[in-house]
Amino acid sequence: MITAVTGASGHIGVNLVRALIAHGRDVRIIAHNSTLGLEDLKVEVRSGDVSDPGSLARAFEGVTAVYHLAACI
């Protein structure tokens, strides 16, 4: 089971990703600009933009759960 996380480089996202990994989940992060704070973690990185449905469709292939934490600030 692959769990995807948007907004994974934010404060809440980094902590969520670490918790998911600690619980044995395979994690895929959807990165728009940055993977800051996630470099040392065993995650799959896919490029995506929450304002581009096509990029999300590609990024979410094979995913069974999504945590949507991305935001436009």
Image (cartoon, rainbow, N blue to C red):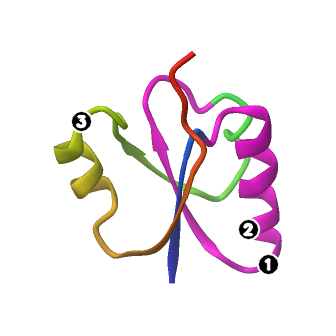
Q: Residue furthest top?
A: 73
Residue highlighted by disc 1: 23
Instruction: Rate crowding at label 3 as few (under 14), some (14 to 19) or many (20 or more) other CA atoms within 10 Å.
Output: few
Residue beneath the point at 59% across and 33% down? 35
Please tell me whether mark 1 or mark 3 is closer to you in this view: 3
Between 43 and 5, which is closer to the camera in this rendering? 5
Q: Amino acid at mark 2?
A: Leu
Q: Is residue 3 left or right of residue 38?
A: left
Residue highlighted by disc 3: 52
Q: CA distance from mark 3 to mark 2?
A: 26 Å
Q: Is residue 60 left or right of residue 64?
A: left
Task: Look at the picture and state if 72 lies above or below 42.
Answer: above
Q: Earlier in the sequence, mark 1 or mark 3?
A: 1
Image: magenta residue range:
8-35
Residue beneath the point at 55% across and 37% down? 70
Q: Earlier in the sequence, mark 3 or mark 2?
A: 2
Task: Look at the picture and state if 31 lies above or below 27.
Answer: above
Instruction: Rate crowding at label 1 as few (under 14), some (14 to 19) or many (20 or more) other CA atoms within 10 Å.
Output: few
Kind of element beneath mark 3 = loop
Between 51 and 40, which is closer to the camera in this rendering? 51
Task: Look at the picture and state if 71 lies above or below 56.
Answer: above
Residue beneath the point at 82% across and 71% down? 22
- Number of numbered discs present? 3
